[in-house]
Amino acid sequence: MNRYDESDLRRAAAAAIQAPSMHNTQPWAFRLRDGGIEILADARRQLPVADHGGWALRLACGAATFNARLALAWAGTPAEVRLLPPDDPEVIARLTPGRHRPPTYAERDRYTAIGRRHSHRDPFWPDPVAADVRIRLIEAAQAENAWLDLLVGMTALTGFSEVAHSADRVLRRDDRYQAELITWTGTEEAPDGMPVSVGAPVGEPQDLIPQRSFAGRRRGPGRDYEPEPLIGILGTPGDRRLDQVIAGQALQNVLLTLTDAGLAASLISQPIEVPPARDQLRRSLGRTGFPQMAVRVGYGRAGHPSPRRDVGDVIIE
């Protein structure tokens, strides 16, 4: 019977920790158990205000699971995946060895894109995203049992902008939310004493999709926005804990697919964090299912990686 070993665990964890997470909390841990690799939720890193229900934690761990799967497939032993096994509530995914085989071209390309994927917080260039690339992004979400709707036309984009800015204003008026945000993205230390990243959370509408950008290119110090941003809404048929983990895997597949195509992305979470805004966004799409993340896609300068914990710090013996 095939079994993963310590080297497989470290390879999978090294890829998994490059996944995105809200406020760069990195709420995951990894362990080798009975020849399989488990991705666990690190409850100490769950945001009690912004993520009291655990949606962002499960999304992040789902993205980490997808990276781990790619690393194992790249090494020639793809994993059979079981999400949220009932015997351990801390386990997000259990990966057991499947049959040995060479990695596919797509798996190789996405694996090599892991280290190049960074959240893009600057304006994008005005170059449009080609139709064939848009199709690939939609197919990447569908491959992981999710959907990706790309907003078309100024009416849809303006409507999304209004929802995103409205949600952002709600969160900015929440003192507890803002205090938590400063703790994780400012100069203070995280709960376990690790210095956290200085930078933006998952999406800031006032920087990423300024309202004036929808009417045309906005110029100013360091600003040159594309005239018609490409916004994608990633969602799932349901909104159970399992659906949120699935959404994380689909999100990472989309992000790595666009990275491999030479694109960059910004994640905009505010419309998902505020329930009335999320419901308004869902109704505006005219489809069944639940939005799980908004993604702004375009061409731009290479981004900078956010700090990551060492692999040894996230592996449980």
Image (cartoon, helix red, strand yellow):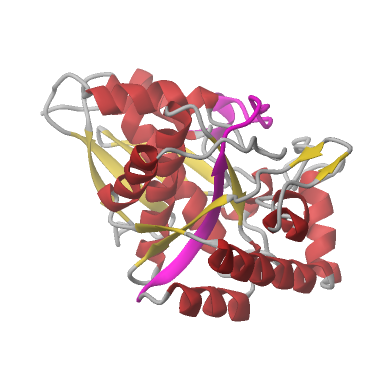
Looking at the image, residue 313 lies above or below residue 89: above
Look at 72% across and 73% down and name the residue there: 166
Whether the magenta-drawn stretch holds residue 294 is answered as yes
- Position in image of residue 200 (x %, y %): 75, 45
Using residue 189 as the reference point, say whether residue 273 is left or right of it: left
Look at 79% across and 58% down and name the residue there: 180
Single out the residue that lies furthest toward the front. 216
Q: Which residues are magenta?
A: 288-317
Looking at the image, residue 281 lies above or below residue 302: below
Classify residue 66 by image quadrant: top left
Residue 56 visible to the viewer:
yes
Camera-nearest residue between 106 and 76: 106
Residue 317 visible to the viewer:
no
Camera-nearest residue between 282 and 86: 282
Look at 65% across and 46% down and name the residue there: 25
- Position in image of residue 12 (x %, y %): 39, 28
